[in-house]
Image: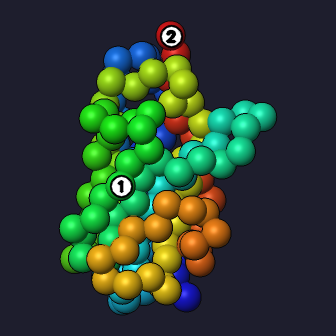
Amino acid sequence: QVQLVESGGGLVQAGGSLRLSCAASGRTFSSYAMGWFRQAPGKEREFVSAVSRSGGRTPYADSVKGRFTISRDNARNTVYLQMNSLKPGDTGVYYCAADQRGSYNYAPVRADEYDYWGQGTQVTVSP
């Protein structure tokens, strides 16, 4: 089992940047594919990005492509989400998730493919 703790959220003006971090407990972080999802008020949770166990697969939602970058540091048991050129539409609670079932080069994009979830960190982008 793994525990996930997100950090780095906050209030930022449109056009600004934030870097989210997700720290995982345990010594098997490298065996998990990792993902970021977000949920805006009154909306369903949506996929943002993911990174495979290999680090070689990094899909993105179309809405964030070219602005967000996901990365992982297995030595620090941490996955990051660098968010640039933020827009008010990026506002929401951002969740980190871990998948232990996928293959080495697989990066899940569906929420039901993930086994563990963090508590979330709030990101608010003002106009």
Q: In the picture, residue 65 is in which quadrant?
A: top left
**Side of 54 where 101 appears, left or right:** right
Secondary structure under tag 1 reads loop
Secondary structure under tag 2 reads loop
Question: Label 1: how many residues lie within 10 Å, few (<14), some (14-19) or many (20+)?
Answer: many
Residue 72 image point, x, y percent: 27, 65
Q: Nearer the viewer, residue 11 or 112?
A: 112
Residue 21 image point, x, y percent: 38, 55
> Residue 32: in sight, yes or no?
yes
**Residue positioned 37% across, 74% down in the render:** 106
**Residue positioned 54% across, 25% down in the render:** 89
Callout 2, which amino acid? Answer: Pro
Callout 1, which amino acid? Answer: Pro
- Looking at the image, residue 97 lies above or below residue 99: above
Q: Which mark, by number, is residue 59?
A: 1
Q: How is the structure coloured here?
A: rainbow
Residue 58 image point, x, y percent: 30, 58
Do callouts 2 and 1 mark residues in contact (Cβ within 8 Å)?
no
Q: In the picture, residue 16 is in which quadrant?
A: top left
Question: Label 2: how many residues lie within 10 Å, few (<14), some (14-19) or many (20+)?
Answer: few
Q: In the picture, residue 119 is in which quadrant?
A: bottom right
- Looking at the image, residue 109 lies above or below residue 121: below
Residue 118 image point, x, y percent: 58, 64
Q: Please give the residue where the numbered disc 2 appears in the rendered image.
A: 127
Spatial distance from mark 2 to mark 1, Cα to Cα? Answer: 27 Å
Q: Earlier in the sequence, mark 2 or mark 1?
A: 1
